[in-house]
Amino acid sequence: MTRQHHGTALDAVVELIGTHGSNAMAEAFATLLEIGMKIEREDVLDAKAYERTESRRGYANGYKPKTLNTRAGTITVQVPKTRGVEFYPSALERGVRSERALKLAIAEMYVQGVSTRKVTAVMEQLCGFEVSSTQVSRAAKELDQELQQWRTRALGQVCYVVLDARYEKVRHGGSVVSAAILTAMGVLPDGTRTVLGTSCSLSEAEVHWRQFLQSLTDRGMHGARLIVSDHHAGLGAAREAIFTGVPWQRCQFHLMQNAMAYVPKVSMRTNVAQELRTIFNAADREEADRRLALMAKRYRKNAPKLAEWLEANVPDGLTVFTLPVAHRRKLRTTNMLERIHKEIKRRTRVATLFPNEESVLRLVSSILCETDDEWQTGRAYLNMEAE
């Protein structure tokens, strides 16, 4: 078909729409698309149909039918093929990309807790055709594979590691239980932050923490100079087993909260909190130890359990003094992770209850993966040249 014939076909399309109105839109769109694909094939071959020319780069090789879903309806077009040169119509390439984008949109709605029924209804409004529950499930499966690859990617040197857990309600064995979401974040040698990994399990027991931490080392994580976390027996035992000899910084924020349980009178809490802050804000470890000793001595008579607790626990929150001054404030608590947990909570509270562990892990992994992408393209979290 020459370009003159293409023009004749276009005239026919105009006449078709003028005669039959919107009912002919699907057929008209199919005709226009086929015309465009044929013109594009001629440009790739550098020759019109049946034209003899020395500049020809290949040959037309018939057509292959393809069914497409469009706003105008479902259409079947004849896709031009070539021989001797690679060719695929750019219009259909755009369709492929749109289809990928559509699947990602479905997956995003899925992880945000939108039911399959609502997804299909919304996509029918947006795209003009129904999306089946099978397609939604397939999109979720594709997302799961992508997230699994991210969770198991290779790691390298990590200078600082921050660990924490949060809980979500999950159905399990006919009842509702609290599943622990274990998460690890780190600071790399260039000062940027990264989400090292996440895992979902039915408790925060040592065996689950041990498996999670072991998975980090199995993926190549090494070189940790400090681990920051809250005090938890299961986590502590797993940390000492997997990261033997790596210094531990107990979260000062949680230490402050824990201390309040040993204050005998409510009226004393403000003073205790202020004194703990003076210890944490000391210029160096020697000064912090001196202030701690004075505080314990001061409360030994009227709050002996508090004094005993201070001496036994506060030193775990002073390990950060071994770091450069510029690093201490950002690594003396698990706040880096706590902020992300707030975002996770904001998203998960819409669902309130997850049908299984896989469902909650999918949502949490999606949020953490997005966070990791932002961190990798953002500014450094720490100046690693600071002393």
Image (spheres, grey):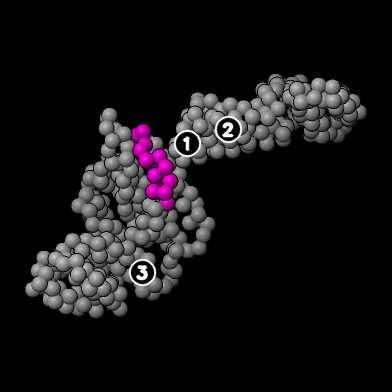
Tell me where residue 122 sits by quadrant. Answer: top right
Contact between marks 2 and 1 (CB within 8 A): the answer is: no
Q: Look at label 2 and name its amino acid.
A: Met
Amino acid type at mark 1:
Val
Q: Quadrant of residue 68?
A: top right
The stretch in magenta equals 343-358
Few, some or many residues within 10 Å of mark 1 (<14, 14–19, 20+)? some
Circle 3: residue type: Arg
Residue depicted at x 87% and y 32%: 54
| Rendering coords of residue 381 (x, y %) | 44, 64
Please, is residue 190 above or below residue 344 in the view? below
Q: Position of residue 175 (x, y in %)?
A: 27, 32
Count neighbours of disc 2 (C-alpha within 10 A) and say few if under 14, some if 14 to 19, many if 20 or more: some
Gap in Å between the C-alphas at discs 1 and 3? Answer: 40 Å
Find residue 114 and name its label. 1
Asked if residue 137 lies left or right of residue 301, the reply is right
The residue wearing badge 3 is 329
- Location of residue 383 with respect to 100 vertically, above or below: below
Which of these two is toward me, 187 or 98?
Answer: 98
